[in-house]
Image: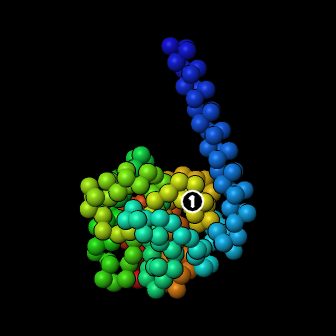
Amino acid sequence: MRHRVLLLLVASLVGLASGWLYTRHLADASSREPSMMPAAGGPELLGRRRPDFTLGGSDGRRWSAGDFDGQLVLINFWATWCVPCRAEMPMLAELHQSFEAQGLQVVGIALDDVQAARDFAAELEISYPILVGGADVMATGLVYGNRAGLLPYSVLIDRQGIVRWTHLGELSRAELLAQVTRHL
């Protein structure tokens, strides 16, 4: 029993250290890529122009932030292995269908394998774009204010391309609806 507890403790510490080093590496890498850096990040990103990005989609297409200009955009960073991400996806799919005609565009950005993200989106009948990647998705999340590197993470961008709201963690339906209807 003591060996299991010790092994669990060591594994947890290694995981935390690895995550910190990986996040640090991404921060260093993104500082060398001016096109990926916003004028500011985190809470300072609120009220500022959204950062640019180009990522591959599960459909094989390359998508850029500018592809969604003129719409109210909800970007949701997620992964198939993330339990709260999986829990909120049906709500996001429903929200997209309900408000798409009014100009809402949900965009899923998965930190995942392309096939896993494609299969999960098909299973839930997701009709909005799913962008997928690894380090490029982590770097995009970082410039969009996700300093913790945790999932899920969501960002609401108004029709003028201004970041209006960010949320780390599983979304509450009531809070999300309030934000979306406020900015439609």
Residue at the extreme front: 60
Which residue sits at x=58%, y=54%? Answer: 135
Which residue sits at x=46%, y=86%? Answer: 70
Quarter of the image that includes the C terminus = bottom left
Q: Is residue 86 above or below residue 175?
A: above
Residue 76 seen in the figure: no
For residue 13, side relative to residue 159 (left or right): right
Q: Position of residue 78 (x, y in %)?
A: 45, 56
Residue neighbourhood size for the residue with mark 1, other residues' Cα within 10 Å, grouped as few (<14), some (14–19), many (≥20) = some
Q: Secondary structure at mark 1?
A: helix
Q: Nearer the viewer, residue 173 or 102?
A: 102
Q: Nearer the viewer, residue 38 or 83?
A: 38
Identify residue type, mark 1. Asp
* Residue under pointer 1: 136
Which residue sits at x=26%, y=55%? Answer: 123
Which residue sits at x=57%, y=59%? Answer: 136
Q: Quadrant of residue 114?
A: bottom left
Residue 23 seen in the figure: yes
Q: Nearer the viewer, residue 117 or 48?
A: 117
- Total numbered labels: 1
Q: Position of residue 12 (x, y in %)?
A: 58, 32
For residue 79, side relative to residue 164 (left or right): left
Q: Position of residue 126 (x, y in %)?
A: 30, 64
For residue 68, side relative to residue 31 (left or right): left
Q: Position of residue 63 (x, y in %)?
A: 47, 72
